[in-house]
Amino acid sequence: MPESASASRATEVTFSDLLDLDDHGDGRYRGVCHEGAPARAFGGQVAAQAFTAAAKTAPAGQKPASMHAYFVKTATAGEPVDYVVTVAGDGNTVSHRSVTALQRGRTVLLLLASFHRPEDGPARWRTPAGPSAPPADDPGDGPRPTSVRGLAVEQLAPPPDGSASDPGLGRYARWMRARSAIGDEPALHAGAVIYLADMVLARAVLQPHVQDSDGSARAASLDHSVWFHSEVLADQWLLFEATSPVLNGSRGLAVAHVYSTSGALVATAAQEVQARQLE
């Protein structure tokens, strides 16, 4: 679904739509991705679809645990992407899958995914730097979203947390959730988190050089990793706190901690980003 076509044809975009795949048998699936940049498929959706394909082959009872992806080539928006899933290993507790995403016969993404059967044990986690509840929102405030991402995702900027500014650290934080209910399938919620994380990580790398309103920079995700610490509900508010500890030359690293409204750390994401035209 091209980003530019969404405004005239859709009033609602769900993650069931965004992660929908045709099953071609023998571990092969096909999807279509919308734009992230002009004519380019949104990388977060490509990664999320690849993970969704892997999850379709996971053993019953095992939940999303992690995924690690490399963006090999830029995919074209609106054209089919084929996902070929290989069973790397199955265990009673942990299973692994590899996925190759192909478009026009070219590899555009390589992904490894793991799935884990939940176990009882001790629990601890860090807490968010800012408030653990989203700011009050006004549904009538601001322009109506027209992009696919705007129709699918609701987001709010958290208030400043009052922490000391570190000139060597890029920061970007957002409260985010799916605008429509996702349902009971854990893989769809996990895929939504993969998609959402790709919306914030590069922004942390670009700070403080590029503000939200400045579109002059060129940034491309080189890879994308997400670890799921517990089951996530992406149609409820999640706080994405992204920081970038280094930007050197054209490459920067960002890490995002993802919190529920209870303050629990439910996922962690990381990306290396290629950033150009920052000055």
Image (cartoon, rainbow, N blue to C red):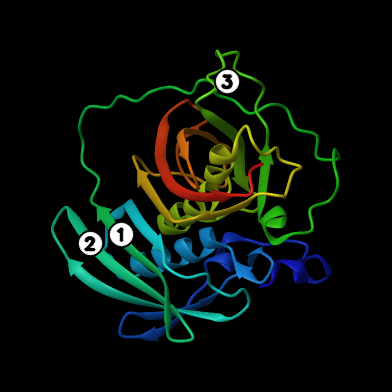
Q: Is residue 263 above or below residue 1?
A: above
**Residue at the (64%, 36%) spot, across then down:** 209
The answer to whether one can see residue 59 in this image is no
Q: Residue furthest left?
A: 92
SS for tag 2? strand
Q: Which residue is mark 2?
A: 96
For disc 3, the neighbor class at 10 Å (few under 14, some 14 to 19, many from 20) is: some
**In the rendered view, does 16 fall on the left or right side of 62?**
right
Disc on res. 131: 3
Most foreground residue, 226 or 26: 226
Q: Position of residue 78 (x, y in %)?
A: 63, 77
For image coordinates 79% across by 53% down, the residue present is: 145
Residue type (three-letter) at the residue carrying disc 1:
Ala
Are the two marked residues, 1 and 3, in contact with CB atoms closer than 8 angstroms?
no
Vertical comparison of 255 with 92: above or below? above
* Residue 20 image point, x, y percent: 53, 71
As measured in the structure, the alpha-carbon distance from the residue carrying label 2 to the one carrying label 1 is: 6 Å
User: Horizontal placement of 200 versus 64: left or right?
Assistant: right
Q: Residue at x 67, y 39 (%)?
A: 210
Q: Secondary structure at mark 3?
A: loop
Label 1 belongs to which residue? 113
Label for residue 279? none
Left/right of residue 76 with respect to residue 186 in the rendered view: right
Q: Amino acid at mark 3?
A: Pro
Q: Earlier in the sequence, mark 1 or mark 3?
A: 1
N-terminal-most mark, 2 or 1: 2
Crowding at dot 1, Cα within 10 Å, few <14 / some 14-19 / many 20+, comes out as: many
Dividing the image into 4 quarters, which one contains the C terminus? top right
Neighbours of disc 2 within 10 Å: few (<14), some (14-19), many (20+): many
Q: Amino acid at mark 2?
A: His
Please, is residue 152 above or below residue 255 in the view?
below
Label 1 near label 2: C-beta < 8 Å? yes
